[in-house]
């Protein structure tokens, strides 16, 4: 097989290509553009070009060529190759290192050997050449013992030189990534992630200059669980100060998630060029685990994933040291909203001392009025993380939209899907793909079947760590905020293997009812409680009327865990 490379015999490009095609016939080319021309005109059956170095970064000459080379669809990418870059300084037979006056190599290679050169040859003249192996060829041709070249070890053998020193690169982890390509009419790759092979897809995206368009375009991948491997921008020559973006994603274009994302990107972008889906190099790469196929692309199971028949003994969900669905009842406590650093630390310390197992607190708050306090956002998440560090209590907090899943998941141990978002299916999918355990609250107007199907969405996306939470439903009764449906707790425990807990604070909206409703919920089989606690409920910024104060919570905790001694108080700075 004839393979065109940028460089000559003994180059890193040739060695990389031989990792894919051991018996190739090398077609040397001086420039990257010549490699493309050789494949287009039939002078070679495949081409191999460097695209990225692990230390230096992108090979911009290759990136700038991609749209021109692949934009008309006559070529396609086929393979990725990762090749370790180890440099050797070489000279004529009989040459000595202390006699070298000039060193030739590609400027990138010279840059990768700066430490060794400054230590061993501080006075030599460094000369840039078009290719590492080409510099070895030049040394052999000029027959000057004062000349040396830096190239791959096998370049010495290819050009009759001898190594003067090996492994002279500054960083032994140095690698270069190569891409190979063939005419588009060549035999296609297998479809999808078949067998043990993994695939990447590379594309060029041109977007309109409008606020948020780049983020919106890239979110098409993130919301579907498609891993964005690389993003590179290059100037668009036809329009000064505009840019084209080169994107590498994990997966083949035929994968359902990738196909959906590409369809959305094509609708949003001014232009999209799919350079190709190609076989990824597994050894030494950092590929993520392939995401499961979206549920709507699979056959509906005969027995729902939430059904108790799938796990008659029940499922246990682990959140740090806390186990939902085990023999111990889980007690989650904390304020409706994180109002300040001092307030959440004070509350966390108090509930930890009283017997709470986890800490709750809203950093993002869904409020009926747009003028009400909406939470502290990321600042609130940081305060919750600090409270966890001080008390040891795992944190559960609500996520309101799929865009916020990543940042909330970064700080929280468990993601809460609130009642208002129980049927926000985009959020359910995104939260599931985050991988963190999920607390799914029942919507105020949701039936048991709708609640369970919301949980089915999460399980179907590959996340089995779901805990259900009954928090009251809206009825004709107005004496309380909602009506706590203890019927549903008993019924759901019969129908699903997932753990079930109860939120009596929202269930009633009245502080005095929280304790009796909590005991009633445990009596019908709930595996835990999540209650709102505030050090000064009368001045709470949200839900003060239903929040327990510290002494009331301590009394409830003694009834939930009568045999558990109080923890030692945490000394807060």
Image (cartoon, helix red, strand yellow):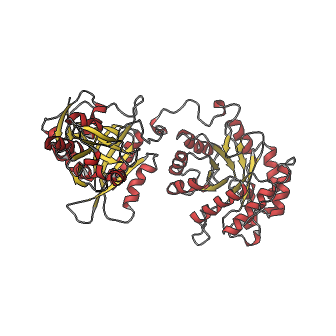
- Quadrant holding the C terminus: bottom right
Most extreme residue toward the top is: 23
Left or right of 261: which side holds 376? right
Residue 398 x/y as whole percent: 61, 56
- Quadrant holding the N terminus: top left
Residue drawn at x 57%, y 41% is 463
Residue drawn at x 41%, y 36% is 283
Residue 440 x/y as whole percent: 63, 49
Q: Is residue 71 visible?
A: no
Left or right of 325: which side holds 560? right
Q: Is residue 443 visible?
A: yes
Name the residue nearer the viewer: 491 or 543.
Answer: 543
- Residue 70 lies in what quarter of the image? top left
- On screen, residue 347 above or below 38: below
Residue 566 x/y as whole percent: 84, 54
Name the residue nearer the viewer: 133 or 175.
Answer: 133
Name the residue nearer the viewer: 78 or 212.
Answer: 78
Left or right of 506: which side holds 378? left
Residue drawn at x 38%, y 34% is 192
Residue 399 x/y as whole percent: 58, 56
- On screen, residue 470 above or below 278: below
Number of disc labels: 0
Left or right of 526: which side holds 461? left
Name the residue nearer the viewer: 564 or 145.
Answer: 145
- On screen, residue 196 above or below 331: above
């Amino acid at each position: 097989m004839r393979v065109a490379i940028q460089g000559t015999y003994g180059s890193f490009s040739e060695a990389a290509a031989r990792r894919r095609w051991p018996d190739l016939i090398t077609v040397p080319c001086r420039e990257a553009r010549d490699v493309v021309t050789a494949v287009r005109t039939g002078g070679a059956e495949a081409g191999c070009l460097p695209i990225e170095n692990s230390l230096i970064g992108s090979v911009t000459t290759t990136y700038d060529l991609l749209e021109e080379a692949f934009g008309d669809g006559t070529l396609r990418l086929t393979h990725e190759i990762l090749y370790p870059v180890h440099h050797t300084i070489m000279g004529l037979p009989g040459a000595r290192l202390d006699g070298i006056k000039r060193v030739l190599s590609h400027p990138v290679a010279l840059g990768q050997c700066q430490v060794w050169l400054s230590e061993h040859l501080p006075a030599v003249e460094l000369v840039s050449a078009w290719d590492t192996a080409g510099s070895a060829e030049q040394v052999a041709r000029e027959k000057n013992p004062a000349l040396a070249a830096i190239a791959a070890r096998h370049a010495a053998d290819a050009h009759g030189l001898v190594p003067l020193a090996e492994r002279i690169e500054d960083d032994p982890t140095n690698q270069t990534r190569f891409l190979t390509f063939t005419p588009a009419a060549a035999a296609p790759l297998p479809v999808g992630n078949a067998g043990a092979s993994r695939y990447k897809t590379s594309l060029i995206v041109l977007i309109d200059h409008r606020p948020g368009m780049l983020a919106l375009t890239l979110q098409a991948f993130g919301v579907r669980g498609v891993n964005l491997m690389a993003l590179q921008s290059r100037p668009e020559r036809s329009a000064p100060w505009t840019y084209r973006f080169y994107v590498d994603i994990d997966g083949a274009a035929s994968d359902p998630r990738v196909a959906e994302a590409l369809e959305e990107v094509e609708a949003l972008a001014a232009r999209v060029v799919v350079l190709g889906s190609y076989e990824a190099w597994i050894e030494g790469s950092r590929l993520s685990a392939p995401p499961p196929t979206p549920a709507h692309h699979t056959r509906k199971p005969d027995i729902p994933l939430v059904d108790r028949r799938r796990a008659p003994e029940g499922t246990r969900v682990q959140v740090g040291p806390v186990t939902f669905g085990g023999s111990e009842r889980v007690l989650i406590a904390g304020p409706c909203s994180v109002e300040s650093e001092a307030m959440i630390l004070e509350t966390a310390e108090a509930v930890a001392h009283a017997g709470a197992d986890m800490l709750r607190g809203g950093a993002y708050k869904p409020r009926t009025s747009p003028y009400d306090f909406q939470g502290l956002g990321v600042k609130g998440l940081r305060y919750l993380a600090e409270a966890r560090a001080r008390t040891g209590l795992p944190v559960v907090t609500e996520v309101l939209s799929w865009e916020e899943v990543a940042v909330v998941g970064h700080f929280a141990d468990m993601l809460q899907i609130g009642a208002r978002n129980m049927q926000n299916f985009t959020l359910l999918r995104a939260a599931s793909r985050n991988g963190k355990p999920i607390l799914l609250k029942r919507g105020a107007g949701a039936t048991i079947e709708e609640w369970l199907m919301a949980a089915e969405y999460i399980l179907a996306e590959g996340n089995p760590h779901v805990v259900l939470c009954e928090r009251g439903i809206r009825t004709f009764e107005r004496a309380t905020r909602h009506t706590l449906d203890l019927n549903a707790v008993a019924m759901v425990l019969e129908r699903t293997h997932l753990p079930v807990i109860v939120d009596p604070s929202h269930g009633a909206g009245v502080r005095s009812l929280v304790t009796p409703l909590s005991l009633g919920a445990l009596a019908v089989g709930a595996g835990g409680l999540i209650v709102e606690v505030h050090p000064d409920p009368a001045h709470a910024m949200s839900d003060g009327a239903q929040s327990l104060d510290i002494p009331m919570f301590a009394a409830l905790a003694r009834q939930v865990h009568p045999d558990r001694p109080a923890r030692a108080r945490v000394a807060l700075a």
